[in-house]
Image: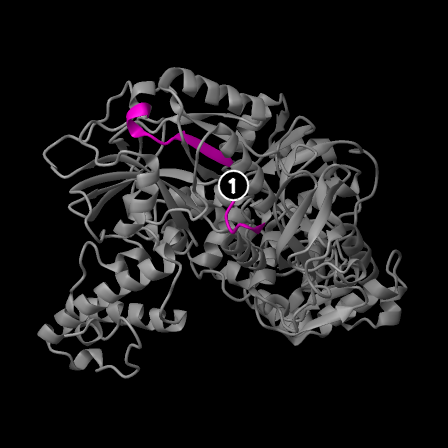
Amino acid sequence: MSEQEENPYLRDPPEELTPVDELSESEAEREAELLREAIRHHDRRYYAENDPVIADRTYDRLFQRLVDVEESFGLQTVDSPTRRVGGEPLDELETVEHVAPMLSIQQSGEAEDVREFGERMNREVGGVEYTCEPKFDGVSIEVVYEDGEFERAVTRGDGREGDDVSANVRTIRSIPQRLRGEYPDFLAVRGEIYMPRDAFQEHNRERVERGDEPFANPRNATAGSIRQLDPSITAERPLDCFFYDVLAARSDTSGTGDADAASGVPDASQEFETHWEEVTTLPEYGLKTNERAELVDDVEGAIDYRDELVEERESLNYEIDGVVIKVNDKAACEELGATSRHYRWAFAYKFPARAGETRIGEVALQVGRTGRLTPVALLDPVDVGGVTVSRASLHNPAEIEEKEVNVGDVVRVERAGDVIPYVAEVVEKRSSGYYEFPGSCPVCDSAIERDGPIAFCTGGLACTAQLRRSVQYYASDSGLDIEGLGGERVDQLLEAGLVEESVADLYRLDREALVGLEGWGEKSAENLMRELEDSKSPPLFAFLSAIGIPHVGRATARELADAFGDLESLMEASREELEGVDEIGEVVAGEIREFFDSEENRRVLRELREAGVEPRSVKRESGDALEGLTFVFTGSLPDRTRSEAQELIEGLGGSVTGSVSGNTDYLIVGEEPGTSKREDADANDVTELDPEEFEELVGTDEDAETDEESNEREANGQESSDQRTLGDSFQ
């Protein structure tokens, strides 16, 4: 019987399959077995041999079929390919001792140091040949197989022991769960887990476009992925692995697998005589090695190998920072031994650092809170003024067109004011034309519109990226200053589905749901609920700043609040009326008018009203009594909302920030304050004021309406100007 007849999923898998719920148990068991075998075969062809025989879509269909069959009939196995989607989250990573020490390597970027290494090898063990390999810039790993089955994977750690990351490494498809061929009964191999450059750029593009911070470089992305406590997160990362050393190999598994600690090489039971034999044999077991490895006759051949590879560095789909030169003969390696830190039989010849010029791997579109799309060049990491840079601003579509920048081009990167990296010019054109913006937002698929040189997503607050940034801004110092709702917690709320459509969702949060989130407790949930309740009556200017009208910050918001008095008047103001306000020009007036004309934005404002948010029009205090003083609040004030207190301070010339530093003059400590700000105040010798002391400091507003006057006005059916609310805008 042919291989194809035995397993129909190896080549040209059938399109039509029996529905899973119509399979008998024996049929399901047989199909699961065939699917596992086929998927292992296709994984090996794709990852180890770089020679796939079926399309990616077909592979995905077979993989999902195996998932469905296993789940429907309870047929999951320890070594099933479906384990690659990730298992249960871990509480912590356990520490495990290595089979053999995983030591470091001497290194230098100078050819003379390499020649000195070669002379020393000749003196100590005679004329030798060398195995040369790329020095991968990833994460070193020990992987152990017993009887051909994946047993465990351990990070390098301190060289003697490391973290058990088996659950995460199982998710990497280029690392087989089961060996093939004539493998040893016990095999411990050393490899390098890495993220391919193209996959890294694509992954970073996705992170930027959904509002997450991109990884600085592939190595950081790999290291963070491998040490996740939730294997399903690792499974989502595009990781790969090269193997390059056998730490121990035996046909008799009765041994302990320990290496001679003095020599740093496996004991005499190992089955390989040379490093080159390892490189050529590991693929027979299904373990991926690097195709650029070479065997050379002497150290000059190793230097030539390095010089050739440095010229090809940019064309490789993985990061390397040099080459590794190893004495080929394993017996000679044992004789040479090791120090307490590094092998004496290996040397790393490093590449020079990239400086200033690098390749653009991807262009990501970052969506701001106002919908503005900022193009970001995702770069092969490059040193710019002593800082490793992996992304740089392209500013806007007009500048991209002017500079003719595109993916694949080599560009010169500079840092504006020695801080913000930007693409200065194209130094080598490797593409045709320039990067053109898509027709729709990469996050919400809404149409993209151009306004001169700037591009905008038209999705408004319905765009997920704009939603994340708008919620963060709404709660920030520039918005309503909602303590306890920083960026990480906003991300938690979005990921948990507690905030899905707009900032109005904040006022529908449930205390029990908050307590159920990681890192939250009863106290933090109660504090946030109280902060949200306090934020329901903000000054109009603070509310206008918080809702994210393009080009309207706190200063412009104050001018608008003073000019129109209430939200209803502002929402109905014409462009001409808006232009009549100080500091409001034609462009800003148009932006304000478009914001309030948007049905989506008006819907969100209605939802805020329904949630109880009532922005107040207040008379601005003026004076310079607090000029030059900086205040921070913690806890709630008994007689004012925090927004009212902030308005008062700023009207008297002071400023309010969200965190304590050496520049802070006073920390106002209200009811149920947090601990971190008080600790920072103590560390920075900042004066604390209780609410009464704060009121004494700012004094009494003689023009303010008294409670008695207010009651009399209400009894007469009159309305104070500071009582007109958002509700009036929707009558």
Viewed as shown, does residue 660 lie left or right of 306? right
Q: Secondary structure at mark 1?
A: strand
Viewed as shown, does residue 135 lie left or right of 552? left
Residue designated by label 1: 320
Q: Nearer the viewer, residue 53 or 384?
A: 53
Q: Which residues are magenta?
A: 315-332
Viewed as shown, does residue 87 lie left or right of 184? right
Q: Residue at x 58, y 59 (%)?
A: 209
330 in magenta: yes
670 in magenta: no
Q: How is the image coloured?
A: one colour
Q: Give the quadrant of residue 362.
A: bottom right
Report x, y in % for residue 554: 75, 51
Q: Nearer the viewer, residue 386 or 663?
A: 386
Q: Nearer the viewer, residue 666 or 604?
A: 604
Going by the numbered disc 1, the residue's amino acid type is Ile
